[in-house]
Image (cartoon, helix red, strand yellow):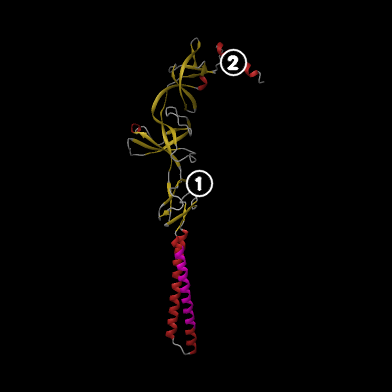
Amino acid sequence: MSKLKPILATALLFAATLGLRPAYTAEFVVEARTIPEMKAVFGEVESRTVVPARARISGTLREIRVSEGSEVKEGDVVGVVVDDKIALQLTAADAKINALRSQLENARMEVERAQQLVSQGVGTQSRLDAARTAFEVATNQVAAAEADKAVIEQSAREGNVLAPATGRVLTVPVTPGSVILAGEEISRIATGPYYLRLSLPERHATEIAEGATVEVGERGRMQSPDQPVATRKGKIVKVYPEIADGRVIADVDVADIGGYFVNERMLVSIPVGMRTVLSVPPAAVMTLHGIDYVSVATADGRMDVAVILGGSFEDAGQDLVEILTGLHDGDRVVLP
């Protein structure tokens, strides 16, 4: 079989040289069509929301648990801030609670002693009431001291810097050992959803409309904007009413760009007007010796006409290729 391939290729080349053509079974009438005029621009991937993870207490940043590009979930610990004074405050709170508990124990014993004396008829009711009051005061003092300790413990727990939402970490502007103030930013998290931000010249302000379909170039293709590679469709979802520095800002919604880098640039072809073109199906074009031909039906049969091709597009669900020169409106093109 491998020996037959060169023979078949040689036979096909010989047949093309002799002008042998395939059989034609259908015709396509060339008609002028109005299609959108596309302009290639660059768009940047952005996140709808970017939220900072901030420190809740002042202190020293002891640990960072994320880096740029990390995926985090809401509530994850992204860093740990430690304030050495909190440990001293906890020690002082424990000592105060122990002292107040000793006073509470003495007050309890005074109440019991006063109750015995009253029951034996040698004590007064006023002394018993005073002992009970002192016991209640000591009880409340212990409860207040324990509440103060709970506040200090909560401050210690707030040393954990938590992710405010689920997303990707964009930046971590601090390093372990840094002195952190309350409210200072530890990291920035892009929570999505992601979209394309376009910045267009002011002359296109009247031509851009919400709901228009755009063509988004293949990721990583940064060739000349005059030659975009369309691989997916997008939709203009918002056109901002303010023009800044001679530029119109528009947002494009594109599916499946959540894995792109934020601020990554992509080629986008946007509709900026309408134009009239002649077109044929791609199957009608033959290429011989580097020249494109189209067979046109005539009164005497058919004739091969050299053409210059433009870009490809889709109209009413049919794939077509633009013909720049060689054909006229109403020509009947024969199809194989």
Percent x, y for residue 327? Answer: 44, 17
Q: Is residue 96 above or below residue 192?
A: below
Q: Amino acid at mark 2?
A: Leu
Q: Dividing the image into 4 quarters, which one contains the N terminus?
A: top right
Given residues 64 and 21, the one toward you in this image is 64
Residue 252 in the image, given as x and y percentages of width and height: 42, 37
Residue labelled with disc 2:
12
Mark nearer the N terminus (1 vs 2):
2
Q: Quadrant of the C terminus?
A: top right
Q: Which residue is mark 1?
A: 71
Which residue is drawn at the image coordinates 47% and 67% (left, top)?
91
Q: Is residue 36 above or below residue 86?
A: above
User: Which quadrant holds residue 324?
Assistant: top left
Q: Is residue 21 left or right of residue 41?
A: right
Q: Position of residue 124 (x, y in %)?
A: 44, 87
> How dense is the environment of label 1, judged by Cα within 10 Å: few (below 14), some, or many (20 and up)?
some
Q: Nearer the viewer, residue 310 or 180?
A: 180
